[in-house]
Image (cartoon, grey):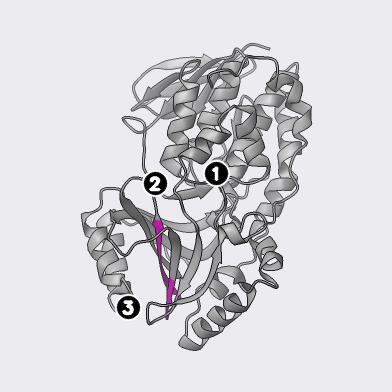
Amino acid sequence: MHHRILISGASIAGTTTAWWLGRFGYEVTVVERAPEFRDGGQNVDVRGVGREVLRRMGLEQTALDRGTGEKGTAWIDSDGEVAAQFVTDDLEGDGPTAEMEILRGDLARLLYDAAREHVDFRFGDTIQQVDDADDGATVTFASGRTATYDLVIVAEGVGSHTRELVFEGENDPRWMDLMIAYFTIPRVADDDQMWRWYNATEGRSISLRPDTHGTTRANLTIQQPANGEQDWDPDRQKAYMRDRFADAGWQASRVLSGMEATDDFYFDVLRQVRMKRWSKGHVVLTGDAAWCATPLAGIGTTLAVVGAYVLAGELQRADDVSSALAAYEAAMRPMVAEAQAVPKIGPRMMNPHSRLGIHLLHGVLNIASQPLIRDIATKSFAREPTSPDLDRYAALSASFDQEGA
């Protein structure tokens, strides 16, 4: 099998795949639409088998060292007091806050810096056309360049443009009835190291989370069916959130003021990507482009790094592209299916619409956080789906020198 590979998207999935394939000796190019590498972003966590992949890359401890310092999760009531909390140090295993909590941009930067020694990154360009043939896929880029690759790996986001080019109309999204705006605001003296979660009526919530950059990561959430809001321009999305949260209470005014001044506003209406197949000819999907489970699943980043490792491992093990892609899909499908089995009632329960509903939620969480039962309750936050057998790739992982990774 030839070894010329294009990866579209300098995402966590894309950079992890590039790291492994570069170490395996493939000629790898990563193309990214953004004009330069994108730092920033909100909290992500890596759990269980995902940490094992980072460990095999020699990056686990560095990722821990670059963590946000978040110490747990606290639900805040209408008086600004803690109604319930889970402190990570008191738990057996990961709870709502995992041991490895890190900003998306910090983890992506770590992977990018480790990968680019063996990988060619090209920013400010994107795929415009893919022509698949028996001997490979010829790609036309927005820049006007053309090139032929033995495999094109699409590691873009939930709204992947290249996925729609190649697999037109095949995505059957599952909408989760939740919209979220993410952005960074200035830190104030009262901000602590807890993830603070405040519920308001009408399915609204405000979250504030710590980082290590002297700022605070905020998000505004509304539980309601989607109505095309993801396609609005940012100014309209901000105006909508400003109107909806004006009377929300707690720190709404501070958060809304910060939203107006932020330079990293991101808005999304949560939906899962549901694809009957992840590959077609010499093109394969991975990460959110293949299976976005949404943040509600709690293991999106874990899926990204595991999927990247499995894809690279199967390409290295197989004699041809088609058998490698079939093995990759067979290995990852069970984990993805379990991760996507989030009941749609979950967002409604965690974002009540009435004061009574909020009171009941806080009561249940307070009981669940008590010492006698909190470790049992924690398992509901930390349950990891069935994962692929990573031992299939252990010998491959040991076949190159990871020193200095």
The disc labelled 3 sits on which kind of residue?
Gly
- Residue 401 is at least partly visible in this image: yes
The local secondary structure at tag 1 comes to helix
The answer to which of marks 2 and 3 sits earlier in the sequence is 2
The disc labelled 2 sits on which kind of residue?
Gly
Nearest to the observer: residue 134 or residue 40 = 40
Quarter of the image for the N terminus: give it: top right
Indicate the position of residue 365 as horizontal and vertical percent values. 58, 75
Q: Which residues are magenta?
A: 198-209
Cα separation between marks 1 and 2: 16 Å
146 up-or-down from 207: above or below: above
The disc labelled 1 sits on which kind of residue?
Asp
Task: Using a 10 Å C-alpha cutoff, classify the residue at mark 3 as few (fewer than 14 neighbours), some (14 to 19) or many (20 or more).
Answer: some
Indicate the position of residue 162 as horizontal and vertical percent values. 49, 35
The secondary structure that dominates the magenta segment is: strand
Q: Are marks 3 and 1 in contact (CB under 8 Å)?
A: no
The residue to which callout 2 is attached is 41
Give the side of residue 104 with respect to residue 232, left or right: right
Quarter of the image for the C terminus: give it: top right
The residue to which callout 1 is attached is 288
Closer to viewer: mark 1 or mark 2: 2
Cα separation between marks 3 and 1: 34 Å
Q: Is residue 265 magenta?
A: no
- Residue 265 is at least partly visible in this image: no
The residue to which callout 3 is attached is 249
